[in-house]
């Protein structure tokens, strides 16, 4: 096992990795920007190193500064967390060149799976179902038009190197396509430095189902069940749960096997996620692989009792998985709510500020992942998520009731968050029945905001288990 690792991230995920390292007896080196001089991850690590000014491009994306900090502090490995450099193939390659273990897949595998067009082609070769669309990168708007006519509208133009909803445009008619193509390409170049695009048939209002996988260096690959991530706003996940009410045992088995096949075919190592869309007829299609730990990984940890970050560290150290597929068992139901510093009443405008007072909920089956503390100043330079609230209970209905209680107990003074809106979602009849998809928030946002303004909620309509 490693003696010392550097954590190339910040916020709650950096704290999460530090906790896993402490339990394994691993020393940690935290990196931080000037804006994060008082950040919790810096205080909890064995030691810390400032790597630059506030802007992410000058600090958390500064590969030279991070690698220098790792080498100079005697680290053996780097954990990238999620976001920032976690899916950067160049950074993974540089780690190897510096004699550092990148805790994740190799740069070669990231290139295979991080480029969505290449990943799509690889999945087709492996026999994993993919959404009808282009076989590779689009060469021109004219090619996109011809292909759209062939597969039928609506279609989705997507950035090959994309993520987080960036570089994506929905197209419902030929007239819309040229402008959508140009806009997606420009956004992809600005966000990822790569303007390559591909095209897929747009599956309207599907369920977004992702399978957690782990793969070790010895060739063992397992999946740990699914997460339903369909409560989204502009392709950004807001709530997740496991297991999904939309999956039968037979469908879960087939999707899980395809997720394992997808990871195995590219020689994957570490923790990753295979993402599918599921239509109303039970057809599912691969859309992408996330070659890192996910924000919502605690949901899987709650229903399986497995520490995913601990497994990441073991795998990176060359150890085999500590369990087999037969030993993976889903127990009960888990829900996660992402709490963002934003104002839903002002079109979800970011709302960073000073945390005047914060109280985290507790009790049976409750987990909070956060780097907040009283007096902490949230930064406008980084992601707006300030906490993740996770609950576990024997049934879905019990988990919903527990999360309601948790959100009522959660107190954060100093700036608005999306927590009150999440609380109302948990009372919506469609959510209670499990009859929701990725279009849920778009369809119901006006109603939910109305309840929020009125300080009311619908009459409770409990779904029968």
Image (spheres, grey):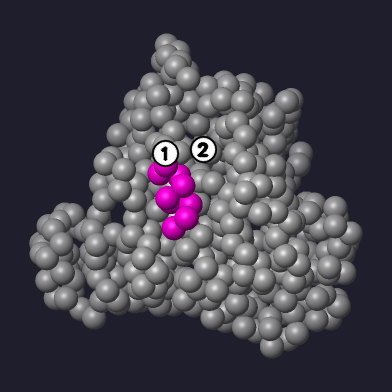
Q: Are marks 2 and 1 in contact (CB under 8 Å)?
A: yes
Q: Give residue 247's mark.
A: 1
Q: Secondary structure at mark 1?
A: loop
Badge 2 is on which residue? 243
Disc 2 crowd rating (10 Å Cα; few below 14, some 14-19, many 20+) is many
In the displayed structure, does residue 125 sit left or right of residue 138?
right
- On the question of residue 360 being in view, the answer is yes
Residue at left offset 75%, top offset 53%: 15
Q: Quadrant of residue 413?
A: top right
Percent of width and height locating residue 200: 26, 62
Q: Secondary structure at mark 2?
A: loop
Q: Quadrant of residue 120?
A: bottom left
Question: In the image, is residue 289 part of the stretch drawn in magenta?
Answer: no
Percent of width and height locating residue 448: 39, 27
Percent of width and height locating residue 328: 63, 46
Viewer-closest of 85 and 32: 85
In the displayed structure, does residue 181 sit left or right of residue 229?
left
Main secondary structure along the magenta-highlighted residues:
helix
In the rendered image of this protein, does residue 151 appear above or below residue 346?
Answer: below
| Residue range of the region highlighted in magenta in the rendering | 250-258
Query: Residue at the front extreme?
Result: 326
- On the question of residue 349 being in view, the answer is no
Viewer-closest of 326 and 146: 326
Residue at left offset 47%, top offset 76%: 112
In the displayed structure, does residue 453 sit left or right of residue 290?
left
Percent of width and height locating residue 347: 40, 41
Disc 1 crowd rating (10 Å Cα; few below 14, some 14-19, many 20+) is some
Residue at left offset 34%, top offset 76%: 196
């Amino acid at each position: 096992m490693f003696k010392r690792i550097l954590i190339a991230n910040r916020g709650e995920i950096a704290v999460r990795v530090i906790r896993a390292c402490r339990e394994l007896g691993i020393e940690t080196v935290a990196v931080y920007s000037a804006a994060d001089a008082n950040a919790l991850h810096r205080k909890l690590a064995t030691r810390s190193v400032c790597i630059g000014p506030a802007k992410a491009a000058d600090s958390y994306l500064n590969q030279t500064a991070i690698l220098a900090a790792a080498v100079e502090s005697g680290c053996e490995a780097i954990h990238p967390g999620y976001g920032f450099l976690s899916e950067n193939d160049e950074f993974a390659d540089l780690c190897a060149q510096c004699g550092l273990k990148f805790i994740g897949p190799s740069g070669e595998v990231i290139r295979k799976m991080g480029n969505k067009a290449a990943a799509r082609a690889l999945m087709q070769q492996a026999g994993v179902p993919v959404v009808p669309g282009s076989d590779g990168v689009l060469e021109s708007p004219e090619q996109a038009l011809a292909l759209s006519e062939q597969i039928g509208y609506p279609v989705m133009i997507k950035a090959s190197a994309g993520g987080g909803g960036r570089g994506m445009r929905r197209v419902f008619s030929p007239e819309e396509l040229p402008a959508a193509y140009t806009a997606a390409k420009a956004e992809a170049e600005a966000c990822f430095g790569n303007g390559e695009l591909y095209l897929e048939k747009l599956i309207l209002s599907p369920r977004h189902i992702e399978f957690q996988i782990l793969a070790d260096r010895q060739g063992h690959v397992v999946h740990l069940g699914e997460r339903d991530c369909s409560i989204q706003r502009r392709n950004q996940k807001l709530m997740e749960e496991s297991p999904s009410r939309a999956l039968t045992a037979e469908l879960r088995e087939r999707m899980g096997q395809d997720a394992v096949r997808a990871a195995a075919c590219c020689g994957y190592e570490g923790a990753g996620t295979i993402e599918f869309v599921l239509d109303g007829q039970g057809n599912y299609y691969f859309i992408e692989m996330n070659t890192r730990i996910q924000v919502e990984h605690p949901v899987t940890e709650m229903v399986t009792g497995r520490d995913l970050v601990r497994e990441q560290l073991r795998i990176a150290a060359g150890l085999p998985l500590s369990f087999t597929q037969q030993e993976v068992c889903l127990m009960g139901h888990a829900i996660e709510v992402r709490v963002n510093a934003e104002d839903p009443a002002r079109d979800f405008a970011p709302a960073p500020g000073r945390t005047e007072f914060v109280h985290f909920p507790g009790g049976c089956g409750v987990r909070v992942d956060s780097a907040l503390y009283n007096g902490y100043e949230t930064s406008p330079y980084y992601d707006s998520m300030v906490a993740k609230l996770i609950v576990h209970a024997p049934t879905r209905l019990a988990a919903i009731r527990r999360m309601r209680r948790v959100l009522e107990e959660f107190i954060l003074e100093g700036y608005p968050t999306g927590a009150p809106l999440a609380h109302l979602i948990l009372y919506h009849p469609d959510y209670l029945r499990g009859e929701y998809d990725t279009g849920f928030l778009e369809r119901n946002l006006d109603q939910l905001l109305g309840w929020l303004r009125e300080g009311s909620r619908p009459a409770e309509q409990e779904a029968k288990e």
